[in-house]
Amino acid sequence: QKEVEQDPGPLSVPEGAIVSLNCTYSNSAFQYFMWYRQYSRKGPELLMYTYSSGNKEDGRFTAQVDKSSKYISLFIRDSQPSDSATYLCAMSSYNNNDMRFGAGTRLTVKP
Amino acid sequence: DTEVTQTPKHLVMGMTNKKSLKCEQHMGHRAMYWYKQKAKKPPELMFVYSYEKLSINESVPSRFSPECPNSSLLNLHLHALQPEDSALYLCASSQSGQVGGYTFGSGTRLTVV
């Protein structure tokens, strides 16, 4: 079993849709949870950074962490064609030695 | 300045060549990282530098040699690479002690022929 599982998609939605992206993990020591957005041929860009369980909202983006279920989500409201990218979840315990990325979900938002 | 700058953006090298990848940041971050990313795969950690000292080497072959000349610069020296080393090489930085939340560069796309 991989430490971090993420459906690679691809996921295609119409403009304006609500997008839900998810990751599950097996290491209960993970405390820090991140979502990165990566455009084609570019480096990952940090979107959301959360510690422990709970919700965090930033504009059209909401990150949720449920440590009891070992499940994290990223919601994108009113999706735009410019949101088309690969979204990577990442997580770590108390140091960077064990930071792990999910496989990434490729999202396409169609006009 | 909130960027990590990587040069060159593209590199094609033969298996007998020696080349170097460069990374620069001026955010005062004291932790810097090299990652390797194959197509449609997540980034894989190669090296971590903390306060200019190598703190993590993820069992990377010796044909990859990292160097951190100062707190703003990170190099990756390449020698005798194999075609399977072709990938996007990403540099990242963060505040020392910060967990995750890296700032990544745009990467160097390396092709070994």
Image (cartoon, rainbow, N blue to C red):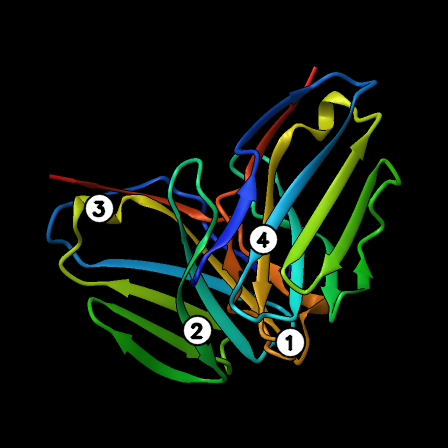
| Amino acid residing under circle 4 | Glu
Residue B10 x, y percent position in the rendering: 55, 28
Which label sits on residue A28?
A: none
Residue B54 x, y percent position in the rendering: 81, 62
- Is tag 4's residue or tag 1's residue first in the polypeptide sequence? 4
Q: What secondary structure is found at the residue carrying circle 4?
A: strand
Q: Observer-nearest residue: B12 or A13?
A: B12
Residue A72 visible, this orientation? yes
Residue at which label 1 appears? B96
Is there CB contact under 8 Å for labels 2 and 3? no
Residue B42 x, y percent position in the rendering: 56, 47
Q: From the viewer's perspective, is the residue at label 1 or at label 3 nearer? A: 1
Is there CB contact under 8 Å for labels 4 and 2? no
Residue at which label 3 appears? A82
Quarter in which the C terminus of chain B is drawn: top right
Quarter in which the N terminus of chain B is drawn: bottom left
